[in-house]
């Protein structure tokens, strides 16, 4: 059988594949919250929701996948998933590669995080043609995303990379502009949709 764009998109949007993707994301989300356990243990409860960034991003996508499997749409979750999956997927890869440069090694767990976070960002972009969010959904997601940055870098709740502690101000600056770039990605994706399968 000839592999065509239509065939690939059919596979990617088939209910069985979406269920598999939901299971993978759910397992990754659970592991992500477990990974943040030690930081949550020393975090004030008022900040709990803002600390585990990556697993919350994949949790947003779990809600999106669940809605699609049920034949429904959840636009606000779609845009939150797109912005945060791309943001934290790229962010974590940059932090891990930066740690590699600083220390010379990140171990198997570090490389596992590089691969899994790359796939987080990739899957979010892969489904751009299927999203139905509008500009007001983007506005709400932008407030959440930028507010999270303030909590992280003004109130000191950012994910902790001990080997990069001396670069916190630079990381905060990078993170802010990465957030802005991901918000613009969501804005431009509305225009791109008409050229993509849905």
Image: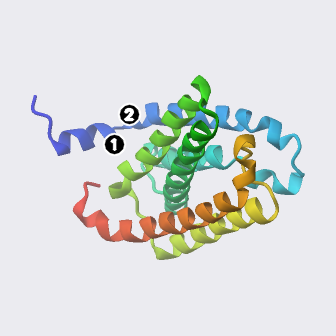
Q: Does residue 8 lie above or below 46 as drawn?
A: above
Q: Contact (CB < 8 A) between labels 1 and 2?
A: yes
Point 49% across, 43% down: residue: 120
173 or 53: nearer the viewer:
173
Judging by the rendered image, the residue that carries numbered circle 1 is 13
Q: Is residue 86 left or right of residue 173?
A: left
Q: Which residue is mark 2?
A: 17
- 47 vs 140, left or right, is right
Which residue is depicted at the point 58% across and 23% down? 108
Residue 195 appears anywhere in the view: yes
Q: Pick the quarter of the image with the N terminus.
A: top left
Residue at 63% across / 43% down in the picture? 55
Identify which residue is drawn at 61% across, 66% down.
176
Element at label 1: helix
Task: State the image coordinates of residue 80 (x, y, percent, origin top left).
Answer: 55, 59
Q: Position of residue 187 (x, y in %)?
A: 43, 71
For the image shown, how many numbered marks are present on the structure?
Answer: 2
Specify few, some or many for label 1: CA neighbours under 10 Å numbering under 14, 14-19, or 20 or more. Answer: some
Q: CA distance from mark 1 to mark 2?
A: 7 Å
Look at the picture and state if 167 lies above or below 142.
Answer: above
Determine the secondary structure under disc 2: helix
The quarter in which the C terminus is drawn is bottom left
Q: Where residue 133 sits: x, y (%)?
A: 45, 66
Q: Which residue appears farthest toward the top when viewing the image?
A: 108
Residue furthest to the left in view is 2
Q: Residue 122: which disc?
A: none
Towards the viewer: 165 or 81: 165
Q: Nearer the viewer, residue 192 or 153?
A: 153
């Amino acid at each position: 059988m000839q592999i065509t764009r239509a065939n690939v998109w059919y596979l990617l949007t088939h209910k069985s594949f979406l269920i598999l993707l939901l299971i993978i994301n759910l397992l990754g989300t659970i592991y992500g919250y477990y990974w943040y356990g030690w930081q949550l243990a020393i975090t004030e409860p008022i900040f709990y929701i803002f600390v585990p960034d990556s697993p919350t991003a994949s949790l947003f996508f779990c809600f999106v996948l669940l809605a699609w499997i049920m034949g429904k749409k959840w636009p606000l979750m779609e845009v939150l998933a797109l912005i945060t999956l791309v943001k934290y997927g790229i962010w974590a890869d940059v932090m891990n590669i930066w740690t590699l440069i600083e220390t010379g090694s990140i171990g198997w767990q570090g490389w596992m995080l590089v691969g899994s976070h790359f796939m987080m960002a990739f899957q979010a972009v892969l489904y751009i043609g299927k999203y139905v969010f509008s500009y007001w959904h983007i506005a709400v997601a932008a407030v959440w995303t930028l507010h999270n940055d303030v909590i992280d870098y003004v109130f000191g709740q950012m994910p902790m990379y001990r080997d990069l502690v001396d670069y916190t101000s630079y990381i905060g600056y990078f993170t802010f502009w990465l957030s802005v770039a991901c918000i613009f990605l969501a804005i431009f994706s509305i225009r791109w949709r008409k050229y993509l399968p849905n």
